[in-house]
Amino acid sequence: MAALTVIWVIARKDLLLEARNRDVIVTVAAFALLVLAVFTLAVDLTPANARAVGPGVLWTGIAFAGVTGLTRAFAAELEHDTLEGLMLAPVSRDLLFLGKALGNFLFMALALAVILPAFAVLFNVVVFRPELIVMSVLAVAGFSAVGTVFAAISAKVRAREVMLPMLFLPVVAPLLMAATEVTAGVTLGRSWRESWEWFGLAAAFDGVFVVVSAVVFQFILED
Amino acid sequence: MVLLGPNGAGKTTLLRILATLTKHDAGSVTVNGFDAAAQGELVRQTTGAVLHSHMLYADLTARENLRFFARLCRISDPERRILEAAERMQVAHRLDDRVRSLSHGLAKRVALARALLHAPRLLLLDEAEAGLDQPALKLLDGVLDEHKRDGRAVVMTTHQVERGLEQADRVVVISHGRVVLDRPRSEVTNGEVTVALGVSGELTA
C-alpha cells in the first residue's frame, strides 16, 4: 500500500502542476486535433475512406502529439533540477518511474477524452464502443511507459525534440498497429472478436514494457 | 566536516555520491551504515541534501513543495513538521507563495527546510551559503550548530575557506579527485589548509 501511495503522490504532484500550467494536456490535445483537421482538409473524405483512413490518422496524431506532450512534461522536471530533487527522496527508482508514468498516462487519457469526440465528428464515424475504450487505455498505458523512459533519456540530450520521436515511435509501432486495427474494426462495424489478437498484442506489449521501463529507468537517472 | 578544494576537484561529485545521485566507479560507499549502491533508499531516508539548485517546483507553493517531500518521506505529522522547519528557516510567512515568486535566497531557505523535514542524521550542503544574506547565514550557522549538538553529521563544501574552517570539526582538502589533507580541525592550522589548497593549484583563501 505504501508503494501505491508513493506512486499516487508523484502523479498527483504532476497533475497539480498541470492544473496550474495546462502545458501538457493542451499541447497534446491541440496537436492531435490539428493533425486530424489537416487530414480532413488534405484528403477528400468520403464515408467509405473516412472509416478506412481515419483510424490511422487518429493514432498517428495521438502518437506525435504524445511525443510533444512527453517533451513538455519532462522539460518541467529539468527546471531547477527538480528531477534530482525527486531522486533525493527515500523512494525506490522504480516507484519514481511508475509515478511519472501514471502522471503521463492521466495527461494523455484526458487529452484523448477531447480527441476521440473530435475524431468522431470530423470523420463522421462511431467510436464510443467498449473495445475502443479498452484499446485506448492499453495504448495510452504503453505510450506512457515507453514515453517516460525515452523522455528521461532525451531530456539530457541537446537535440531532445528530435531524439525523443526517433526513439519512441519505432518502439511503440506494434502498439500503434494494434490501436489502429481495433479502431478500424470499430469504424467498419466489425465484431470485437475479430480484433482479439490485437488486444493480446497490446496487453503483452504493456506487460513487457512497463516492467522493462521500470528497470531501465533507474540506470537512466543516475550519472 | 568541511570539504575544500579548487573548482573541478570533485567536491560536488563526492556529495552527489553520498546523496546517491551519482554512482561511484570503484570501491564502496557506506553512508550512515548503509551501502549507497545496494541500500540507496535507506541512505536517503537518513540523509538530507541541499545542492547547487534549490530543486523546488517553481509553480508549486513552498508549502506544497514541502508537503510533497514530506509525503514521500512518509512523515506521520507533515503539517506540523513543515511549519516547524519553515519557522526554523524563517520562511513560514511565505509558505503559501509560489516558489517562482521567491528570491533565490528565500528559495534556498525553503530547500534547507526541506532537507531538515525528515530529521536526517547526515546533512549534505554544497555551497549552501551561496545566495544567502547575513540573517540567513546566521540561521544556517544555527542549524549546523544544532545538528552538531544533536550528534548528527554535516558534510559541507564551501569556497569561503575561513567560514568553513570556523564551522568544521574535520577538514578535508580534495584535489583532482584525491584527498590531499584529512585532519581534525584542532590538528590543522589555517596555514596548512592554505598550503594544501595552494598545492592543488588554486588559492581560495
Image (spheres, coloured by chain):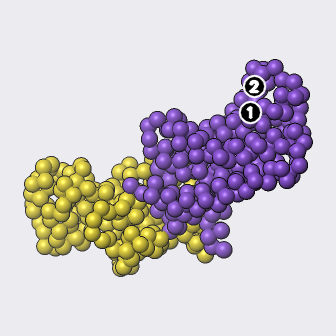
Chain colours: A purple, B yellow
Residue B70 in percent (x, y) is at 57, 67
Q: Judge from the rendering whether residue B102 lies leftward or rightward of residue B166; answer left or right.
A: right
Pointer 2: residues within 10 angstroms few (<14), some, or many (20+)? Answer: some
In which quadrant of the rendered image does the N terminus of chain B lie?
bottom left
Looking at the image, which is closer to me, B205 or B49? B49
Q: Judge from the rendering whether residue B37 lies leftward or rightward of residue A178; answer left or right.
A: left
Which label belongs to residue B138?
A: none
Which residue position is annotated with label 2? A39
Residue B137 in percent (x, y) is at 36, 57
Q: Is residue A62 above or below residue A209?
A: above
Task: Work out how far the residue at label 2 is from the one at label 1, CA to CA, in angstroms.
Answer: 7 Å
Q: Residue at x 58, y 72 (%)?
A: B74
Name the kind of residue labelled 1 in the image: Val
Callout 2: helix, strand or loop? helix
Q: Residue at x 74, y 45 (%)?
A: A179
Pointer 1: residues within 10 angstroms few (<14), some, or many (20+)? Answer: many
**Are the residues flagged by discs 2 and 1 in contact, CB closer than 8 Å?**
yes
Which chain is disc 1 placed on? A
Which chain is disc 2 placed on? A
Q: Residue at x 55, y 69 (%)?
A: B73
Q: Judge from the rendering whether residue A165 lies leftward or rightward of residue B40; answer left or right.
A: right
Which residue position is annotated with label 1? A57
Q: Residue at x 74, y 51 (%)?
A: A198
